[in-house]
Image (spheres, helix red, strand yellow):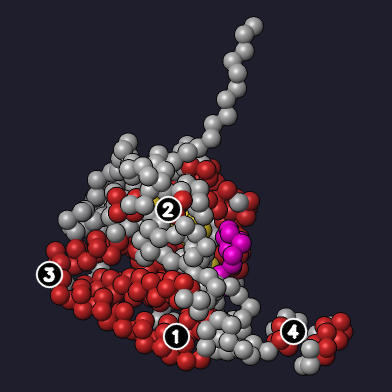
Amino acid sequence: MTRNALDLHIPAPQARPGDKPDFSGWSFPEPGETPRPEVDAPALELRDFAYGLIRVLDMEGRALGPWAPRVSPQLLRRGLKTMLLTRAFDERMHRAQRQGKTSFYMQCQGEEAVPIGQALALNADDMCFPSYRQQGVLIARDYPLVTMMHQIYSNKLDPMKGRQLPVMYSSKKDGFFTVSGNLATQVPQAVGWAMASAYSGDGRIAVTWLGEGSTAEGDFHAAMTFASVFRAPVIVNVVNNQWAISSFQGIAGGENTTFAARGVGYGVPPLRVDGNDFLAVYAVTQWAAERARSNLGPTLIEHFTYRAGPHSTSDDPARYRPADEARAWPLGDPIERLKQHLIVLGEWSEAQHQAAREEAMETVRAAGREAEKVGVLGVEGAHEPGTMFEDVFKDMPWHLKRQSGEVGT
């Protein structure tokens, strides 16, 4: 009997540095084409939503179809201004790292509609378990930019007291759980918090985010099992921005199926949405939040978007993808698309947009000046060595007391 030689498949992106960006063969449903199911629809009836793409805005800025949310122009303008502010903040902090003022930074360039569209669709006291590109949630909740900068610079007003990497924010008051550099750890924490909220009769839901590559982590799968079995009031957001640190989404399984399809095997409703469409992101989040608040359990949302910038300041995307791939992304830029929608409505103009952009940049500059007066990375005495022993144990054990004494505290 003749046996064929086995051949191992190694996923590879369609284009590499020096190639022309290639999105040929990609197809998406038209805006407004995807039906909107009832919030209480059984998960089994929703499986097809894992394989399409919910879209509201067309490329001319018109809102189409049953998913188009009923939102005021005021809320849309707030969303646009918050996205502009977030992008301006990212740009300044990225430059600050290059200037040696901080050790590390991560932007959410091109993905702003995901955290901000969702933040505006949630209740202010819903608990967020973010990954490291959800700074827009804090900004949408009016967390002070200067406090974020103190944390990034690790100066003496850093609310994390120098104990976290830059961009790993935390704010109990704002329902923003501490960011973790270990990917997917937030998902079981979010599910556990949601279970506790339901068990105690609270009315708040949990929301968590992870990247498409992190769905390969065991934490994700354990959390999805618990969420499904106990019908936890949680929204699990997979932000598929096409690229992990340097590997494309096919390495995590994106060649074979969608990331929303992960929900099918757990009996969790799967929604796949255009992550660069602010209105679509807002609408699916409203739907999932209403489902969770109605004791109907979790929802898995895949946000199909694109990481326009580097993974972090430690990354050079020119080494693994075409330099102009972001500009060729077929679903456009979220800020430009929402701007165009407001112009179509007669609620915005190019002049207003330029003024809002300049206002955002000046707001960030002013916060930067205030934060840098306190200090940037490496300022002598920003954090006394003895503070490393604080906030760890209620009653400090003997060996730490001894070590604390050795450093003079």
Kind of residue at badge 4: Phe
Which of the 4 image quarters holds residue 16?
A: top left
Q: What stretch is highlighted in magenta?
A: 177-187
Q: Which residue is pictured at 55% across the width and 89% down the height?
A: 157
Kind of residue at badge 1: Val
Look at the picture and state if 189 lies above or below 378: above
Where does label 3 land, which residue? 346
Residue at mark 1 to residue at mark 4: CA–CA distance: 26 Å
Residue at mark 1 to residue at mark 3: CA–CA distance: 34 Å
Which SS class for mark 1? Answer: helix
Q: Give the mark, 1 or 4, whose residue is nearer the N terminus.
A: 1
Q: Give the mark, 2 or 3, whose residue is nearer the N terminus.
A: 2
In-front residue for pair 80/100? 100
Left or right position of 86 against 157: left
Q: Residue 217: x, y in percent?
A: 60, 51
Where does label 2 land, which residue? 318
Residue at mark 4 to residue at mark 2: CA–CA distance: 42 Å
Q: Nearer the viewer, mark 2 or mark 3?
A: 2
**Quadrant containing the C terminus in the rendered view:** bottom right
Q: Nearer the viewer, mark 4 or mark 3?
A: 4
Left or right position of 349 against 105: left
Where does label 1 land, which residue? 146
Q: Which residue is pictured at 51% across the width and 76% down the height?
A: 100
**Quadrant containing the N terminus in the rendered view:** top right
Kind of residue at badge 3: Gly
Residue 269 seen in render: no
